[in-house]
Image (cartoon, rainbow, N blue to C red):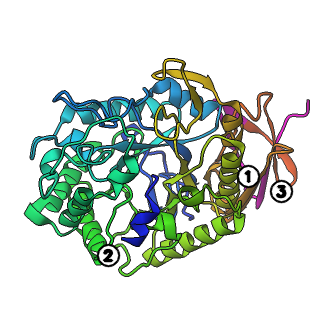
Amino acid sequence: MKRIAAALLLAACSEPVEPPPEDKRDAWTAQDGVLVDERGRQRVLRGLNARVEGVFDVTFDDGRTALERIPPFGEDDCRFIAEELGMNHLRLPVNWSAIEPERGNYQSDYVDHILDLAQACDAHGVATLIDLHQDAYSKHIGEDGAPLWAIVPPPTELLEGPLTDLEQRRTSGQVMDAFDSFFNDREGVQQAYADMAAWLAGRIAGKPGIIGLELMNEPVNIIFEQRLDEFHERVGSAVRKSAPELTLFFEPNSLRNLTDTADVRTPIPFEDAVYSPHIYVDVFEDGWASSDVGAIEKSVGNAIEEANQHHAALYVGEFGHGPDEHGLDYVRACLDIFDANAISSAWWVYEEWSQGSWGLYDIGPDGESRGGLRENVADVLARPFPSAIAGKLKTFSYDASTRTLTISIQDAIEGVPHEIAIPLRVYPDGIVATCDGAEVEATVEAGRAEVSCVGSEIVISAVPR
């Protein structure tokens, strides 16, 4: 994410196969611009980001005040998002500072915790993308990301919480100097990052629920943009050497959050890759005061073209707005556009007790615990979609007023069922499924439905009350 100041801008189809062994059931790949699972089904990810206590590293061990309080998140949360919201995906931000607090000293216990969470979510059909996350380079000078030893030149001032000066941190001289050093590999700091990413990839590849590794959240590179291409090649090559079958997710320059477009100078030099821009059209400039849906459509259209130039699948790793009605209008507009273009996405953010206090929950009266569910937010996010289509997914749309999902497909694979996300919040009494107008049986369980259809249109509607 997130609130990168405007000042920064200025200064698939295949034949059915036998199910894979249990430990390989999440072997998704990016093929021909779409995500495909081990059964040849085109997958759509719909989920959210969650900064998780014990994973998102914003605390210090030298007496400094933590930057912010991070909420807990566990299996019950994954059950809720799978069953009540119908989502199938968690983008999980992790931090270099927690993986390698001392140079060359990788923390296996930290990664074990990540893998336990991914496995717990996998039990509910929620697939996890591991996101190497940074904001303002490092918790020691900004918000999160790099360990202290990886700040080059060494910081002139160590910072602490609370994050009352976040915008100033993100454009500070020492943050900009650290990014410049990183992308120019001064003192081998970028190579150290590549080594860390390769070690992490080796630990997570093939583990239950893990579908990929994102190389860096919102990279900041203002002057020498080709350095970002070089970064992707260096780090991606290291990851591929360690984990050849792990899907790579990669982002454009973070300035795209403001410009809504990114130049593709050198296409990503890897197969099985996913282009992962964020969509925050005017959100951090003026709160999307214009309410211009066309501007979102333009940004998404640019992202589609950028992904095509990279020969990569497209996935929106972050989009979102505040929890008021204006913000929810933005989220609705994004989801409608993602549906029309069959784009995977992850909403920001599950729960937040600081900064903008976005998320699904109010803050508890003590300011450090979960309050009540924001029903209006849950109602917007609870939305059916085609999670896995045995054939080519052309488009889909959802009419919230009638609770009707319409899915257009072609070249359906006979003998392989489609999987449809059917949130209990939307369909508490069950569904009616049709294939080319004829009612068909749907096997329903825990926010999912399996439907067999070799036709061209599937319609899901609510059981009449």
Say whether marks 1 and 3 touch (CB < 8 Å). yes
Q: Which badge, 3 or 2, comes first in the chain's sequence?
A: 2
In percent of width and height, residue 270 lies at 34, 70
Residue at the (53%, 69%) spot, across then down: 260
Residue 447 colored magenta? yes
Vertical relation: 156 (above or below) 122: below
Along the line of sight, the residue nearer the viewer: 129 or 32 = 129
Q: Which badge, 1 or 2, comes first in the chain's sequence?
A: 2
- Pointer 3: residues within 10 angstroms few (<14), some, or many (20+)? some
- Which residue position holds label 2? 225
Residue type at numbered disc 1: Cys
- Which residue position holds label 3? 436
Along the line of sight, the residue nearer the viewer: 112 or 244 = 112
Residue type at numbered disc 2: Glu
In percent of width and height, residue 159 lies at 24, 41
Question: Which segment is the magenta one?
Answer: 443-465
- Measured in 3D between alpha carbons, the distance from the residue under mark 1 to the one under mark 3, in whole angstroms, is 8 Å
In percent of width and height, residue 80 lies at 58, 28
Residue at the (66%, 48%) spot, across then down: 327
